[in-house]
Amino acid sequence: MIVRASSVGTVIRSLLPFGTGSAAHPDWTVCPIWPPDVFAVAATLASSSSCYAEPGLLLHRNAAEQTEKRKFVASAVRIGKRWRRSTDLSTPNRVQSWWKDLWRSRDEPLCTGPEEGKLWKRACMKLLAAADEACSGVGYTPDEEGIASFVWNEFLSNTKPDLENIPNSIAFQVPKEVACVLPKALTPDVGCTVRSLSHNLALLPGIGVVKAEWYIGDFPAARPSISRNTSNAIEGLREGHSMNLLLVPFPYSVHGLDFCVSRISEEGGPERSRPAGYFRVRQNWLKIASRTITAAQFASFLSSLIRRAARDMGEIHGVVLP
C-alpha cells in the first residue's frame, strides 16, 4: 500500500517520533499513557483535516445524530474521569480501542471529504474528548489526587521535573519543538474551530513558532508538597495573592470618520511621497473641542482612575487599554 505524505500515520509519527511504548524501536500500536500526548495527536489530526466541521460527525443534522452525540459526550466524560483518577496512569480499554482504530487507518489521507475515513475521524474525536476530560483542572490548584495533582507538583518542583517540556508544554512524548499542549483558561462560546472543542487543554505550535509558557505563582503556602498541603495552598491564594488589573475601555467611542484612505494612486508621482499603508487614523478622541489632550493630561486621567480603583481593591498591578 502506498503511504501518502499527508496521511494519518505521518501525523502520528511526526508528533511521536520515538513511538508510544518503551520498546527499543519506535512503535505506535499502543496508545500513549499520558492524556496530553493523546490530545496533541487527536487535536492535530482534527485541525489538519478539519474533520470536526463535517456534518454527521460533531455537527448533527437530525434528532438521531443529536442523540448519538449526547451519548458520545457522556461516554467521553465518564471515561475521561476514570482516566484522570487512575493512580497508575493505566489507559482505559475504550481509549486503547479508539487508538487501535486510529492506527489501523494510518495509511488513509487526511483530507478526502465528509464521506471518507469515518472510522479514524470518529476515533479521533473520541480520543480528543476523553483526553481533554482526563485533564480537567490541570494547571490549577487541584482538588483531588490524580493527573491534575501530578501536573501541579511538576510545575512547582524545585528539581528537574519528569515533564521535561514544562513550562512550554505538559506533553511528555511529543517534543515541544513539534507541538505544545498547555492548560486552558477559556473556551469560546461560538464558532466551530479546534479551540472550541476542548475545555481543559489547548494545542499550540512548537516553540520555534511561538514560545508559550504556563506558570503557577510561587506561593509559600503551596510548597513543598502539594499533595499534603493542598488546603493550605488554597488558603494562600485566598489571602490576597492576586493580580488586580484595571481595564480602561478608552477611547469610549470611535467614529467612522476617524479612519481615512492614506494611499491614493498618483500617476507618475514619486514613490517616496506616498504614505506607507492604506489607511490612516485620526485620533479625534484625544481632543476636547479643538484642543489636543497632552500626554500629561492623559496620564493624570489614568492616575485618577488607578487611585479610585485602589480604594476598592488595594494595589493595582497593571492597566489594560484596548
Image (cartoon, grey):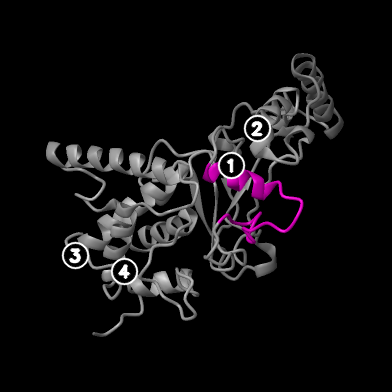
Q: Which residue is mark 1?
A: 149
Instruction: Identify the secondary structure beneath mark 4.
Output: helix
Q: Which residue is mark 2?
A: 230
Per the rendering, the mark at residue 116 is 3
**Mark found first going from the N terminus, 4 or 1:** 4
Above or below residue 69? Residue 4 is below
Q: Are marks 3 and 1 in contact (CB under 8 Å)?
A: no
Above or below residue 234? Residue 75 is below
Of badges 3 and 1, nearer the viewer stands: 1
Give the residue drawn at x 55%, y 42%: 148
Q: Amino acid at mark 1?
A: Ser
Q: CA distance from mark 3 to mark 1?
A: 40 Å
Residue 260 image point, x, y percent: 57, 45
- Does residue 59 appear in this view? yes
Of badges 2 and 4, nearer the viewer stands: 2
**What segment carries the magenta color?**
146-170
Side of 52 relative to 66 (left or right): right
Q: Residue furthest bottom?
A: 2
Instruction: Identify the secondary structure beneath mark 2.
Output: helix
Give the residue drawn at x 78%, y 27%: 316
**Mark found first going from the N terminus, 3 or 4:** 4
Name the foreground residue: 87 vs 320.
87
